[in-house]
Amino acid sequence: MLKDILRDLINEKDISVASLARKTSVPKTNINSWLQGASPNIEQLYKVAQFFDVPIEYLAFGKQVEDPMSKFMDKFHIHTGLYEISIKKVTPKKNVKRKHDK
């Protein structure tokens, strides 16, 4: 699984294994061994995932695992947005006299 995904990403990016190794500081021999089916070092795999801008779960397992924080952050942004809207609605305009102001 990893070997196929990694090979596809390398081909899509049109990058050599040697160049990938230099840019990620992961030894070329390790990347080549992954392409042959060897198990990766998780720290090195993380560097490669960052380089390709993919979740490490996708690189390792071939599927994207939903980030549990994404649901929270979506709700947080909605809540923040509603809060900002409510502040804008209740903030009185300047120089407007209200009935109870004298």
Image (spheres, helix red, strand yellow):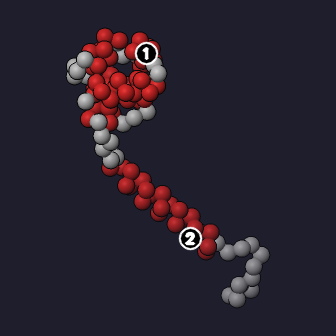
Image position, residue 85 (x, y; %):
57, 67
Residue 83 circle label: none
Is 42 drawn above or below residue 77 in the view shown?
A: above
Q: From this viewpoint, is residue 73 visible?
A: yes
Instruction: Name which of mark 1 and mark 2 comes first in the sequence.
Output: 1
Residue type, mark 1 in image: Ser
Label 2 element class: helix
Question: Is residue 82 toward the left or the right of residue 22 in the image?
Answer: right
Residue drawn 37% across and 55% down? Answer: 71
Residue drawn 23% across and 21% down? Answer: 37
Is 48 drawn above or below residue 31 in the view shown?
A: below
Q: Name the foreground residue: 62 vs 27.
A: 62
Q: Residues within 10 Å of mark 2 (few under 14, many from 20)?
A: few
Residue 16 circle label: 1
Question: Which quarter of the rendered picture does the N terminus lie within?
Answer: top left
Image position, residue 64 (x, y; %):
32, 42
Q: Residue furthest bottom?
A: 99
The residue to which callout 2 is attached is 86
Label 1 element class: loop
